[in-house]
Amino acid sequence: MKTFLRVIIEFVFKIYYIIVHRMKVEGRENIPMDEPVIFCANHKSFLDPPLIKITAKRNMYFLAKIELAKNPILKFLGWVFEVMYVKNDEKDINAIKGSLKHLKKGDCIALFPEGTRNGLAKGEKVRDGAAFFAIRGGAKVVPIGISGKMKPFTKLTIRYGKPLDYSSYKKAEDDKKALEEVTEDLMKHILELVK
């Protein structure tokens, strides 16, 4: 049942993005198709997750703040797409274990380092979750830049960058510094893709 709903909803979103936003996809060839991947993008809209899901063409598990589950529609979509909810104010052990488990199995996870929509513009501190999973999980990170306005009938472009390998940080002596360096480098690559 869930798989059937997922296919239908993905199809509807695809049509929506093609017609309403004249969706353009660049760099899809950069996505590894046979290994675990961490997808990381800038965050413009609550419609970013389905945009990534339908263009990456890989099964993935999104991490999202638990507050989104209060909205019935978003909660339903979270159920269909098996979203892993994260408690923002603390280190969510279940989300961490779940994400590392998916990566170990060869699956993909997706998250937004900004933590919230337009987080950088709002002055929010960039989260280091992606860096943590890249170092601990050993998976490559595919940076994503989403550009264009979310208004109807305006062009929207999603760009996939080349995979980033941060495995050399696994044996870093200073964990905090390693997380900061990886997060900074990752955000630099994401912002370069937002033209």
Image (spheres, rainbow, N blue to C red):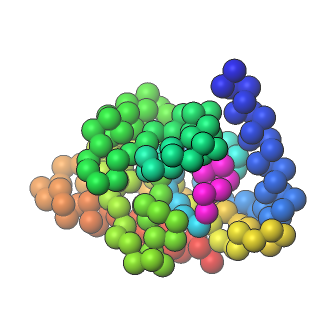
Q: Residue at x 26, y 50 (%)?
A: 90
The N terminus: image quadrant: top right
Of residues 194 and 150, which is closer to you in this image?
150
Point out residue 42 in the picture as x, y percentages from the top left corner: 53, 65
In this picture, residue 39 sits left or right of residue 86: right
Point out residue 35 in the picture as x, y percentages from the top left corner: 50, 37
Point out residue 165 in the picture as x, y percentages from the top left corner: 40, 53
The C terminus: image quadrant: bottom right
Q: Residue at x 29, y 54 (%)?
A: 89
Magenta residues, start to end: 45-53
- Magenta span: predominant SS is helix
Point out residue 22 in the picture as x, y percentages from the top left corner: 83, 64
Of residues 110 and 170, which is closer to you in this image?
110
Q: Residue at x 72, y 30 (%)?
A: 5
Q: Residue at x 53, y 60 (%)?
A: 41
Residue 37 at least partly seen: no
Residue 70 at least partly seen: yes
Q: Is residue 25 magenta?
A: no
Seen as rendered, the residue at the extreme left is 173
In this picture, residue 191 sits left or right of residue 5: left
Q: Is residue 50 magenta?
A: yes
Classify residue 166 by image quadrant.
bottom left
